[in-house]
Image (cartoon, grey):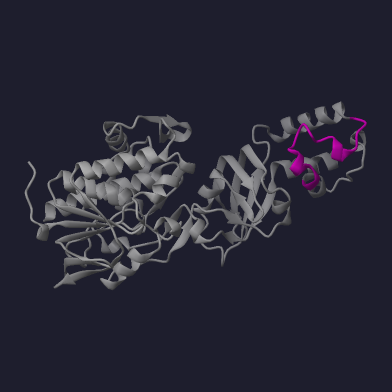
Amino acid sequence: MTRQVTDTDRIVVIGGGAAGMMAAITAARLGSSVILIEQMGRCGRKLRITGKGRCNLTNDSANDELMRNVTTNPKFLFAAFSKLSSRDVQDFFEELGVPLKVERGKRVFPVSDKATDIVDAMVSACRGAGVKIIFDKVKKIEADGGEVSCVKCEKGSYPCRAAILATGGVSYPGTGSDGSGFEIAKGLGHTVTPLVPSLVPLTSSDADCKRMQGLSLKNVSMKIKDVESKKTVFEDFGEMMFTHFGLTGPMVLSASAHIRDVSTKKYRAEIDLKPALDEQKLNARILSDFSKYSNRDFENALSDLLPSKMIDIVVKRSGIDPRKKVNSVTREERAALLSVLKCFSVDIKGFRPISEAIVTKGGIDVREVSPKTMGSKLVSGLYFAGEMLDVDAYTGGFNLQIAFSTGALAGESAAYDL
């Protein structure tokens, strides 16, 4: 049964992204008077560009698997995932009239492949639940006696009993994730852990990357190794691409979440260009190609084995004379070629700017937030949701699942705590 509340009991949600809209919808459906404040002129700007405009909105996984794919503070999200699971998210959008599909890696997308369908459905759900959407920039949250009392914006002030901060991280600032929410939280006494990029392309000083820029590799495997300890910190199979600055692509973005501090550690990517073939089978494949092109120069005998942009670079790395006839290549030289193909290495220099990251690693210290409610332990009536929190995950829909789950829990808790 819903409750009637006055404007002085209302909830103000700050941020009209995935987490903020989910929080607003949840609270309003429970009978709360809800204002959603978004500074960008329209809601869901970042949501519109996720998944290359297709919106990978969740991963079709059970809660324990969701938690295994969270790289920072996974246990903190137990209650949030229990409140709103992946199945719940899928049901939510299908009930709003957005049919969904599951693709490789359990990634969930709208059947239309249009992120705008997800945004439009959420905006419509907000309005249908009675949420008042205001476009303004929040300057501060007032808290009298340790309790939220008012949200002050550039154009007006909104007395309230609860405020939900869901302004995102600092990646893609053009979508509204400009870090302003962190400053508001700091003003209320909260700690913000260091903000660094996650799910971001990797830079390299290796000139070979620039020479191969634009080249995409599919069905390759990659390891990221700590050069000093020789430990493998990441390993995966999939797609990647060379760029003028280094490496990008789905596999590389996931790898970035495992690289903790490029300023003090040196990392190297080791790419297996032929992971489906062990050394013995690859050697047989090379011998077959060499037999086929027995009268050609070495540099002209690799077109069946490699993309054209890689051939000169692999030849150089193998140390074999490019003009040598392949029928004269020795066993030792063939072993050198095999080594390059199974371990094409690229030294990692660092990350691309945080503004290019898909998500922000770091945020509100979760030790200052109740995992059962998303409520602040320092200020009564203050809640957090989404990328503002120091939680992040791999690619594949997991980060949007975090946004929806924490948003739903924050919205429910704010509604019931009034």
Picture quarter with the C terminus: bottom left
In this view of the protein, can residue 339 be seen by the observer? no
Q: Count the marks: how many?
A: 0
Residue ID at (91%, 34%)? 296
Residue situated in front as seen by the camera: 344 or 229 = 344
Image location of residue 396, percent across then percent down: 44, 41
Image location of residue 339, percent across then percent down: 74, 43
Residue situated in front as seen by the camera: 3 or 70 = 3
Image location of residue 190, percent across then percent down: 29, 69
Q: Is residue 386 magenta?
A: no
Q: Which residues are magenta?
A: 294-313
Residue ID at (77%, 29%)? 284
**In the displayed structure image, the side of residue 81 where residue 236 appears, left or right:** right
Residue situated in front as seen by the camera: 100 or 328 = 100
As displayed, is residue 237 above or below residue 319?
above
Q: Is residue 303 magenta?
A: yes
As displayed, is residue 366 above or below residue 316?
below
**In the displayed structure image, the side of residue 413 where residue 119 appears, left or right:** right
Image location of residue 347, percent across then percent down: 66, 56
Residue ID at (64%, 41%)? 216
In this view of the protein, can residue 132 be seen by the observer? yes
Picture quarter with the N terminus: top left
Report which quarter residue 326 is drawn in: top right
